[in-house]
Amino acid sequence: MNSANKNLTSDALNKLVKAKDLDTVDKQVESATESNARKRSNSEARKAAESKTDEFYKALEMARGQSLLICIKGYPDPDNIASSLALEWLAQLYEMDTKIIYFDEISHHENRALVKKLDLELEQYTAEIDLTKYRYYAINDSQNIELPIQLPDPCELLFFVDHHKPLGTVEGHFIDIRENVGSTSSMYVEYIQNAPVVFRGDSSVETKIATALMHGIRSDTDDYVNATAADYKASQFLAPLVDKDLLSLISRQAISAKTMDLTQVALQHKDIRETYLFSGVGYVREEDRDGIGQCADYLLHREGIETVVAYGVVGNSFIDGSLRTKSHTLDPDKWLKDVFGKNEEGKWYGGGRKDKGGFQIPLGVFSKCSDRELLWILIKKTIDELFYKKIGIDSQSSRDGDLSTGKV
Ligand SMILES: [Mn+2]
């Protein structure tokens, strides 16, 4: 121990001894012990993260010079898009030839703005794109490895990085799933911080990536309400590197006219049961499906409501629903799985994370029904009865008895 440390220690001891109240001493000792325990668990978490980062770079080294297809599954969102950009930057440091593709329409107007304002080169999958040259593929920010297309044969899963509860088994070269992190973007910031090249954010590409990652973190943590230490740390690293004007441009919380209309319909058809609010919004166009989640977000602000489920028929082909909750006890993932179960292939119709979830049920042959009003009545009745059963309410006691069609 050097003399400076000795002085510090004896100073600290003096302060403790001088404390008038013995209780204070106890409390200080206690809090020192607690903070040591916290430090220990922090350092354990840091070690685990470090070894994952090492593993990440080993996988990149192994795949050096090869081609990598980065797949955005589901509706492209800020966290997924940013993670894909970060992975592309990292893979290119290892001379990898990369392409980012997505499958579903970018439906949310803010996400379209993100792609446009950042001038991103994302390509929507079409059968014309030749994927045979890809040796590896990657999936970020998704609960499972299922893709809507069959990749050509020797294409192996190189990276799977996510922060949700995994669905099914994931096998691949590098897998990093951390449920205690609020966004996949934060996990990528950790890799980036350990990159062989310093990420300075001083090139336009790096500024773009930093801005997208910051937006990804904010968007997935509901503006830091659900952020964890890892998300704050990642944001601290990104803060000096982002383009603030660009960030405010892409994260402006404007509500589209369509979502407003949808919210109005949802309010008209709301069905409040205890602390639950259910709302069937009727038929929704494919490009407006994100509006269902946004109106569920909005309805959750209603006083006395803890859980909202909004649903509708999207693109005349499936029932799409969003669950939002501020309940301390309701687990959206479990709740939706209990309500809807699995399809015949053993795939769950719904799932979620801490405070939100969603479900999709294909209409199958019923989509051919010529009487849309009648079909909606049947759908609404079926779904509502499932909800009532789940929360233990008799469906006969339907408050308004109204099965009106929520046409949009
Ligand atoms: Mn995410």
Image (tube, rainbow, N blue to C red):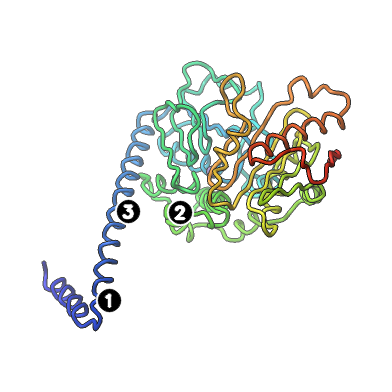
Instruction: Name the residue carrying label 1.
Output: 24
Q: CA distance from mark 3 to mark 2?
A: 12 Å
Mark 3 lies on a secondary structure that is helix
Query: CB of residue at label 2: within 8 Å of ligand 1?
Result: no
- Image-based side of 30 in relation to 267, left or right: left
For the point 43% across and 29% down, the residue is 158
x, y (%) of residue 184?
Answer: 49, 44
Instruction: Name the residue carrying label 2.
Output: 228
For the point 68% across and 50% down, the residue is 274
- Image-based side of 343 in relation to 238, left or right: right
In the picture, the disc for residue 262 is none
- Image-based side of 39 in relation to 191, left or right: left
- Image-based side of 18 in relation to 102, left or right: left
Closer to the chain start, of discs 2 and 1, is 1
Closer to the chain start, of discs 3 and 2, is 3
**In the rendered view of the protein, which quadrant contains the C terminus?**
top right
Q: Residues within 10 Å of mark 1 (few under 14, many from 20)?
A: few
